[in-house]
Amino acid sequence: MKKVRKAVIPAAGLGTRVLPATKAMPKEMLPIVDKPAIQLIVEEAVRSGIEDILIITNRGKGVLEDHFDRAPELEERLLKSGKQEMYDEIVGLTKLANIQYVRQKETKGLGHAVYCAKAFVGDEPFAVLYGDDVILGEDPACGQLIRAYESEGLGVVGVNEVTPEAILKYSSLKVSPIEGAPENWMRCTDMIEKPAPDKILSLYSILGRCVLPPEIFAILEETPPGAGGEIQLTDAMCALARRDSMVAVNFTGKRYDMGSKLGIMQAQVEVALRHPEIGDAFRAYLKALSETL
Ligand code: UTP
């Protein structure tokens, strides 16, 4: 069984749900207090044992590359003003992993974005971390999926239960227990993207993480445009689940949808409350504010 060493982070979407903020700035660069979403996602991948990362970008996303690059003027200023700790953090950021970039020339959907990683992935299994889904927790979500892949040898999707209202906007999975496996691992044999109410398979939905075998590229080649006229990764994974079955891991950790306004605010508030520098002051502010609501 090949180890999972590579990860792909698609970050070439248009982010229309958070316009105008995302007109000139990628949603993946939206900060959660003081770190952009993409940095938290790269950190999760690195904590999961990933060594090589490919970020799928597009026009106007050079700022993503700059974030993981050296910044000599800034570094010199930090050193001169004795801000050693911040200097270490800024330089450390450039050494997190071996990060490469490729452009998705047309915004043809998440499946198409993942297909852009074909040459990078080669003949290895790989993780996909959606660039607008931040998952925070002790045990990195991507690592939880990798453990399932390396044990079962099947493609893995990260899932959580969502509400009956939310499932209509996400994917819905057909799942069953796996004997002798951890309680939060399930067999997945079918899935549907944005189901009509009478087509819901369960309230388990894929939320931003999967580990896929390289065979997914041959399936993507055959996948026609689906919902919204885009090539959907879920459609390709559905073909894989029906053919070989997949594993669904009900991961631990809190997921924030950085592609939605509410998700961005939830992430900001919850991370700010735990933040070592501003946590106490923010809590006091929030308490006082809540009394006026
Ligand atoms: P989304 O569908 O949530 O992103 O894709 P979007 O298209 O930017 O969303 P809207 O416009 O607000 O509805 C999930 C992830 O896949 C990437 C996005 O950047 C996001 O991180 N993506 C999506 C691509 O890389 N390429 C695409 O063609 C579509």
Image (cartoon, rainbow, N blue to C red):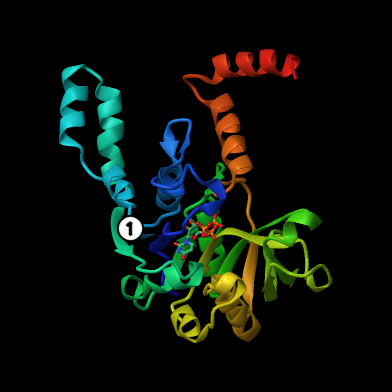
Left or right: residue 74 versus residue 206 is left
Classify 85 as above or below 203: above
Res 179 seen here: no
- Mark 1 C-beta closer than 8 Å to ligand 1: no
Residue drawn where x is 37% and y is 71% of the image: 116
Say which of 143 and 255 sits in front.
255
Dividing the picture into quadrants, the one containing residue 194 is bottom right
Dot 1 corresponds to which residue?
A: 59
Give the left or right position of residue 163, taking residue 149 as reference: right
Q: Residue at x 47, y 54 (%)?
A: 131
Q: Secondary structure under badge 1?
A: loop
Whether 229 is drawn above or below 22: the answer is below
* Residue 102 visible in the displayed image: yes
Q: Amino acid at mark 1?
A: Arg
At a point 71% along the width and 69% down the height, the residue shown is: 173
Determine whether 174 is above or below 131 in the image.
below
Q: Position of residue 130 (x, y in %)?
A: 50, 57
Location of residue 268 by image quarter: top right
Q: Position of residue 199 (x, y in %)?
A: 79, 73
Q: Nearer the viewer, residue 254 or 114?
A: 114
Residue 284 falls in which quadrant of the image?
Answer: top right
Tell me the quadrant of the picture where the N terminus can be found: bottom left
Residue 110 image offset from top left, x and y in percent: 49, 67
Point out the image quarter for the C terminus: top right
Q: Is residue 271 above or below residue 98?
A: above
